[in-house]
Image: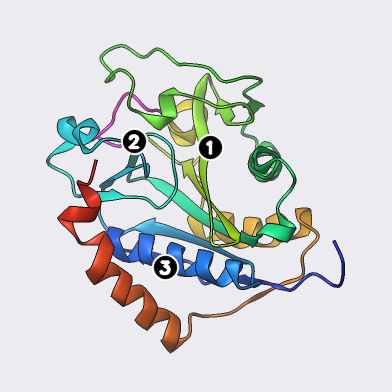
C-alpha cells in the first residue's frame, strides 16, 4: 500500500432498530468507499431476523412473529437477540487480496479474546454443516460454519458476511452470547461455556484489538449530523420498505 493508511473511525456502542442498524452500516460502507475506514459495535433494539442480500424472503416464513430486515451483505438468515454485532468497512486498498482473509483475521482476534476470558474456541477448518435436532434446515447462518468461523462447545458462536461495493468492503459479524427463545437450537457462549460476557467490555476491547490487527490507527468518533441524515434517508427509502425487504 502506497502512502500512510487513514485512521479508522471507531463509532460508539449503541442499540439500533433494525432499519437504522442496516442504514448506518451502509453509511459506513459509503465512507469506506471514499477512503475512510470505520468500525462499529451494536445491539438490536428488539429481536429481529435479518436476511442476506441474496436470500429469498420465504426463508423467514418460520419467524413471522419477528421483524425482518434485508442486510446489504450476503449470507444466510440470522436471528439477532442476545448477541453483539459488528460492522467493519474498509476501502478496497486496505482489503487483503482474498477478502476471506479479512474475515479470518477478525475471527482470530475475537477467538483470542475469548480464549483469554477462559472460553475455549476452535476455528472451523473448512466449510461445514452443523446438525441440530428440530432446527430449520438450510436457512440458518449459525448452522453453516464457513472456514475460519469460531466454534465453542461444538457450536458456531462467531460468523460474518461481506459485501463489496462502491470501492469498499463491508463485513458484518455476529458474536452469539446466548441462545434466544426465538432460535433455541443455536447455543451461544454462555450456554456452552457458562461465560457471561460484559457487552461494553467486549466492544471496547475488540474495538482496540481489531484495528491493531489491521495495522490501523484508530479513535472514537461519533456520527456526524450529515451521516445521521444520510442514514435516515436510507431507512425510509430502503430498509423500512417492503419492496426492499421482500424483493426476492
Q: Residue furthest front?
A: 166
Residue drawn at point x = 74 percent, y = 73 percent: 6
Q: Compared with residue 68, is residue 239 higher up or lower down, i.e. above or below? A: below
Residue 199 coordinates in the image, percent (x, y): 49, 55
* Secondary structure category for the residue under label 2: loop
Instruction: Read off the magenta span.
Output: 180-187
Residue 89 coordinates in the image, percent (x, y): 58, 60
Q: Say the numbered circle drawn on residue 175.
A: none
Q: Say the numbered circle drawn on residue 24.
A: 3
Do the residues bearing badges 1 and 2 touch, measured as CB atoms within 8 Å?
Answer: no
Residue drawn at point x = 47 percent, y = 16 percent: 129
Q: In front: mark 1 or mark 2?
A: 2
* Secondary structure category for the residue under label 1: strand
The answer to which of 174 and 243 lies nearer the viewer is 243
Q: Which residue is mark 1?
A: 158
Q: Compared with residue 198, is residue 10 higher up or lower down, i.e. above or below? A: below
Q: Which residue is mark 2?
A: 77
Does 185 lie within the magenta span?
yes
Q: Residue furthest left?
A: 65
* Secondary structure category for the residue under label 3: helix
Amino acid at each position: 500500500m502506497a502512502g500512510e493508511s487513514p485512521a479508522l473511525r471507531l463509532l460508539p456502542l449503541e442499540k439500533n432498530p433494525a432499519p437504522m442498524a442496516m442504514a448506518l452500516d451502509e453509511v459506513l460502507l459509503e465512507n469506506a468507499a471514499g477512503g475512510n475506514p470505520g468500525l462499529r459495535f451494536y445491539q438490536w433494539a428488539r429481536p429481529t431476523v435479518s436476511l442476506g442480500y441474496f436470500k429469498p424472503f420465504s426463508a423467514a416464513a418460520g419467524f413471522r412473529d419477528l421483524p425482518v430486515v434485508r442486510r446489504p451483505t450476503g449470507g444466510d438468515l440470522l436471528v439477532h437477540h442476545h448477541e453483539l454485532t459488528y460492522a467493519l468497512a474498509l476501502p478496497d486498498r486496505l482489503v487483503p487480496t482474498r477478502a476471506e482473509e479479512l474475515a479470518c483475521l477478525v475471527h482470530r482476534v475475537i477467538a483470542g479474546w475469548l480464549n483469554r476470558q477462559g472460553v475455549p474456541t476452535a476455528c472451523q477448518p473448512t466449510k461445514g454443516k452443523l446438525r441440530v435436532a428440530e432446527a430449520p434446515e438450510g436457512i440458518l447462518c449459525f448452522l453453516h460454519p464457513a472456514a475460519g468461523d469460531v466454534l465453542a462447545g461444538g457450536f458456531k458462536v462467531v460468523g460474518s458476511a461481506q459485501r463489496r461495493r462502491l470501492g469498499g468492503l463491508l463485513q458484518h459479524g455476529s458474536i452469539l452470547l446466548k441462545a434466544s427463545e426465538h432460535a433455541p437450537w443455536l447455543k451461544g457462549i454462555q450456554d456452552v461455556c457458562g461465560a457471561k460476557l460484559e457487552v461494553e467490555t467486549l466492544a471496547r476491547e475488540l474495538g482496540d484489538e481489531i484495528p491493531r490487527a489491521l495495522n490501523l490507527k484508530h479513535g472514537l468518533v461519533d456520527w456526524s449530523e450529515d451521516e445521521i441524515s444520510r442514514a435516515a434517508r436510507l431507512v425510509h427509502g430502503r430498509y423500512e420498505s417492503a419492496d426492499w425487504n421482500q424483493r426476492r
